[in-house]
Amino acid sequence: MSIHWKDPFGSNFFGLWLADRRDRKNEQNSRIAARWGWLKPLGERGKVIWVIAGNTRESVHQAAELTVALRANRLDIRLVLSFEHEYPDLLAPLDECDKTGWGYAPCDHPRALARAMQRLEPYGIIVVNTPVRPHLHALLNQHPRVLVTHPQFCTFHHETIGTGADLQTLLTQAQIDPNFKTLVNQGHERHLWWWHSDSAADHPFIKQWINEAPEDVLFVSGHQPDAPHLAISQWDRQPMVDGQVIWVDDEKWLPAVSASVTGTHFSRGDSELLWQAMAGGAAITCVLPYLPAQNAMLLICPTPLEKWRDWRANPIHARQAGDRARRSFWQERRQAESDSRALIERVFEW
């Protein structure tokens, strides 16, 4: 984990003071209280299980779903979920959970962590898909019951459960309506492509592909494309014109896109979207994948142009690559289901 002195969850006192001042100005007093360890479990009785998430959507999503599953299996325990970034849509299912509290995490200052531990007295701790900062690392090293969902992030002492399969696959939309391509093309025989762009550095390559395949349609997510484009949120469901560039400014469309394109390229390794692309069954190139399980099935290259030319000329090669990616996704998902059950059973034994 990269640590900066301005980290609002770090341990630099001046950086934390600046974060407090900013939150006070924005009337985020509950975040200030949490930063300094003023956490409290709901309910009066029962062991406390502390679920620790980070700041990414993947981490918070997995932690929220795990918390819901733990509540369904253990009605006697008290659950606390902490996170570093709030995603209200992902946290909504917790509203139905009894004796379950959630909110911002404490910072990594020793005084804040000591206060949090004193107030929570967690019987067990679960770290979900996130690295931890130095002082929390030392604290976890001393705790007798620590589980992690992604062992590759963790060097502190913890109990190993399962194989470390990515739980994000359980949250990936795998049953996808196949009608999107028909809606886009409406009788046209042409290829669709998806480029997940990291920065403006991709724009020359994107323009080059548009010139090479002027009758195809290109979807671009991430960084807004420099070329003339239509935002998918403004699409009127009419057939798209040849050479159309579509900026996917609403990610709810990406599952449908993933199942409709001939090929996909990722300029950065976004685990959530990579699994979605693999589940959709498209052939994939990637500058750098996020996890070894993805690395095994993806073609590593700085730009996709050469592979896309091959897949456009030989669609069977693209289908074969997409089939391999889909099989790898389902293999990881089955292992994640097994790991998730094992983790919940282990907590049930606490």
Image (cartoon, rainbow, N blue to C red):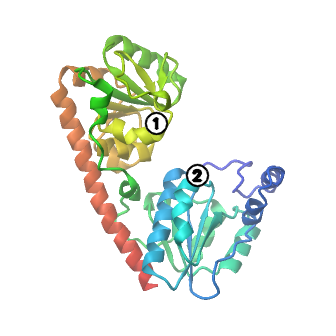
Amino acid type at circle 1 is: Arg
Q: Point out which mark residue 114 bears.
A: none
Image mark count: 2
Judge by depth and name the residue closer to the eye, 224 or 56: 224
Residue 163, picture quadrant: bottom left
Residue located beneath label 2 in the image: 1
Q: Earlier in the sequence, mark 2 or mark 1?
A: 2
Select label 2 or label 1 by which is in front. Answer: 1
Which secondary structure lies at badge 1?
A: loop
Residue drawn 30% across the image and 55% down it = 332
**240 relative to 59, above or below:** above
Residue 340 percent across, percent down from the top left: 37, 68
Horizontal arrangement in the rendering, residue 127 relative to residue 305 (left or right): right
Residue 177, picture quadrant: top left
Residue drawn 49% across the image and 57% down it = 61
Q: Marks 2 and 1: CB-CB under 8 Å?
A: no
Residue drawn 53% across the image and 83% down it = 77
Judge by depth and name the residue closer to the eye, 228 or 334: 228
Judge by depth and name the residue closer to the eye, 331 or 25: 25
Dot 2 crowding, Cα within 10 Å, few <14, some 14–19, many 20+ = few
Residue 103 percent across, percent down from the top left: 65, 64
Q: Point out which mark residue 268 bears.
A: 1
Dot 1 crowding, Cα within 10 Å, few <14, some 14–19, many 20+ = some
In this view of the protein, can residue 261 be seen by the observer? no
> How far is the residue under mark 2 from the one under mark 1?
17 Å
Q: Residue furthest bottom?
A: 45
Horizontal arrangement in the rendering, residue 332 relative to residue 116 (left or right): left
Residue 261 percent across, percent down from the top left: 30, 31
In this view of the protein, can residue 65 be seen by the observer? yes
Residue 5 percent across, percent down from the top left: 74, 49
**249 relative to 75, above or below:** above
Amino acid type at circle 2 is: Met
